Amino acid sequence: MILTVTLNTALDITYRVKALRPHASHRVTEVTERPGGKGLNVARVLAALGHEVTVTGFVGGATGRSLQDRLRDAEGMSDALVPVNGSTRRTVAVVDTSTGDTTQLNEPGPLISPAEWSAFQEAYEHLLRSASAVALCGSLPPGVPVGAYATLVRAARAASVPVLLDTSGEPLRRGVAARPDMVKPNADELAELTGSHEPLQAMKDARRRGAHAVVASLGAKGLCALTPDGEWRAPAPDRLAGNPTGAGDSAVAGLLSGHAERLPWPDRLARAVALSAATVVSPVAGEFDRPTYEDLVGRVTVAERLGAA
Amino acid sequence: MILTVTLNTALDITYRVKALRPHASHRVTEVTERPGGKGLNVARVLAALGHEVTVTGFVGGATGRSLQDRLRDAEGMSDALVPVNGSTRRTVAVVDTSTGDTTQLNEPGPLISPAEWSAFQEAYEHLLRSASAVALCGSLPPGVPVGAYATLVRAARAASVPVLLDTSGEPLRRGVAARPDMVKPNADELAELTGSHEPLQAMKDARRRGAHAVVASLGAKGLCALTPDGEWRAPAPDRLAGNPTGAGDSAVAGLLSGHAERLPWPDRLARAVALSAATVVSPVAGEFDRPTYEDLVGRVTVAERLGAA
């Protein structure tokens, strides 16, 4: 199975309101809820692609129970979340139906105790034994050491499980130094990590810092990959109107599933770009539109050598 | 015991954010949750005054479980909520800590089935047997007949239990016709019920429509009462800066507890006004500040005859 780690899981709540006006009272016309946090989003896409997926991370409180109830109803995803005393956070996306704009309210995560962090590491090492690949995704909740991802990368490497890291800031910097198989920064994360705003230079620097392969997601420009096997560029298809929420997580799912299936790099990138684009055009935020994906995956052009960018 | 009915219970969630900006992403700095809906607010104040209180209404889903967990921790309140298939609604109050302003997002209630409404009526009639007074509070969730409060008022009168009705719109109009012992409209609700914006005329009309006693809450002007025993006016004390959320519910608690203790009307009104004012000045929305209440309750002036207003 493929393992995804979401240390800061969330219950993603979406409210639709007619028009959001600060300091007014609003009747919510529609409420939707689903398990959230980047690793859970990646897992949902992997399961939709037909992979056996196990999700882990922390879960707690009444919101955690809601999240697990919904996970139980989701096909193809096994729940290996580790219970904690604190309560799983909610995120509330308020969609203004008159403009389509979204206002986001994110609760902080629960405070994780040292004992809970130890219990997680033990569970994680056990799960690695049956994992074909692992993705470490998103922010750290309070209480988890900033070097957490470095520890988890090292454990995956010790267990010979390919590991992809998708996070930002200091947790990314420390995680990269532990030599993950892949990192997938966006332009901002890459610049923050390396100090360079020139993607090719920054990707080279990220590899020097420890990442075996770097796949940078450059928004509408698509993906660039710098790997031990070569360099590739996979531009995003044109005519992409929609909601970019979750497009990066879909790209991670494409890269990781391609890796697990031992596809060559160009095929992994084509899959990641097609999934990403199919997520942008999907009417449901964070899900991909299957006909769009199937149409695009054979048509994405992957060019060799980044210098040609 | 005193019974309070909240057909549209809620889990009231308060988020504090630095500054609310539409279409931006916000980190919530503080999250608080408590059982909500007008009848539950009334019950909390009654319990704080030392009364034995039972709460009923509908409860369901994961949010309902959270609400009941918190109710279990609250002293002096017995939970007689009736389970339903749908999920109890949440209300989210987003407090902008830079201005103190609040933006409110209210989920719709669960859809109540005819069988659930019947089960509620049966439970309610059973609870009335041990009730010294009952308050019927707030809006109706979808599926409950618009004449619901009229039905519940008639059942209370048949059981010889004094009944106070605090709602608005068509449910108020129909409920008043069933001859409740007391209604507590605010200025808008009274005008909507009677078509008159002149409080004394409107209160007389409300009595003609069926209410035995009418206590109108006129905001900063305080309370006016038109009853079979006489007319009174109890102005609000000066210097009331604060949050009016829950002030009306505290007034209901004051009126109902005074009724249960068979206090004369002026004492009931003094208690209601003092509780209301102590709620406005409380730093926690919907709770009353006990020292303020104890200071004010002996000092509120109650004038006889509304004509003198």
Image (cartoon, coloured by chain):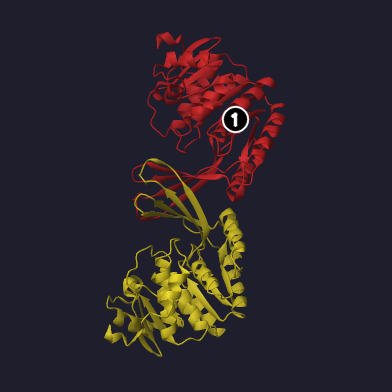
Chain colours: A red, B yellow
**In the picture provided, is A171 more to the left or to the right than A151?**
left
Identify the image quadrant of the C terminus of chain A: top left
Image x and y of residue B27, in percent: 45, 42
In the image, B213 versus B255, the foreground residue is B255
Q: Residue at 34% of width from left, 68% of height from top?
A: B240
Q: Which residue is mark 1?
A: A148
Image x and y of residue A285, in percent: 47, 37
For the question of whether residue A278 can be seen, the reply is yes
Answer with the quarter of the image where residue A243 lies.
top left
Mark 1 nearby-residue class (10 Å; few <14, some 14–19, many ≥20): some
In the image, B78 versus B274, the foreground residue is B274
Q: Residue at 27% of width from left, 78% of height from top?
A: B198
Q: Could you tell me the amino acid type at mark 1?
A: Ala
Q: Compared to A130, does B272 lie above or below? A: below
In the image, A117 versus B11, the foreground residue is A117
Host chain of mark 1: A
Identify the image quadrant of the N terminus of chain A: top right
Q: Compared to B273, does A192 lie above or below? A: above
In the image, B117 versus A223, the foreground residue is A223
